[in-house]
Image: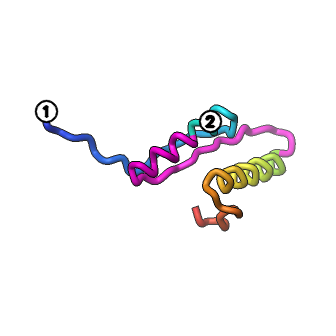
């Protein structure tokens, strides 16, 4: 199919565990999203642990929001439901 062009990239999904390697991938994805005018969607999957799951989830959610704010240049996490 010569002459066909690929559809534009409108969304980039970045899975992250906030390790140094995934933060490097996030940095690259941010540059790519800016260059393409695409939205950036982060995916962080929490490990389910039977011991005090609620506390762990709250901590990991807070840490994920803090790191996302830092990487996007915002000083505070987005309000609940804003993302």
Of helix, strand and loop, which one carries label 1? Answer: loop
Contact between labelled residues 2 and 1, with CB atoms less than 8 Å apart:
no
Residue 26: x and y, percent? 57, 42
Q: Which residue is mark 1?
A: 2
Q: Does residue 16 sit above or below 35 in this rendering?
A: above
Residue at image x 70%, y 62%?
A: 75
Say if the magenta span includes residue 31. yes
Mark 2 = which residue? 22
Report the disc number at residue 77: none
- Is 53 or 9 nearer to us in this picture? 9
> Secondary structure under badge 2?
helix
For residue 78, side relative to residue 52 (left or right): left
* Residue interval drawn in magenta: 26-52
Residue 36 shown left or right of residue 43 in the figure: left
Q: Position of residue 47 (x, y in %)?
A: 72, 38
Up the image or down, 7 lies above or below 77; here it is: above
Image quarter where the N terminus lies is top left
Magenta span includes 7: no
The residue drawn where x is 26% and y is 41% is 6
Q: Nearer the viewer, residue 64 or 72?
A: 72
Q: Could you tell me which quadrant the C terminus lies in?
A: bottom right
The residue that appears at 80% across and 50% down in the rendered structure is 59
Compared across the picture, whether 65 is left or right of 2 comes to right
Q: Which of the 4 quarters of the picture holds residue 78?
A: bottom right
């Amino acid at each position: 199919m010569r002459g066909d062009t690929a559809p534009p990239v409108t969304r980039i999904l970045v899975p992250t565990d906030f390790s140094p390697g995934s933060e490097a991938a996030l940095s690259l994805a941010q540059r790519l999203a800016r260059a393409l005018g695409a939205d950036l969607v982060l995916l962080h999957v929490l490990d389910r642990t039977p011991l005090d799951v609620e506390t762990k989830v709250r901590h990991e959610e807070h840490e994920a929001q803090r790191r996302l704010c830092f990487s996007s240049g915002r000083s505070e996490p987005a309000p609940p439901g804003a993302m």
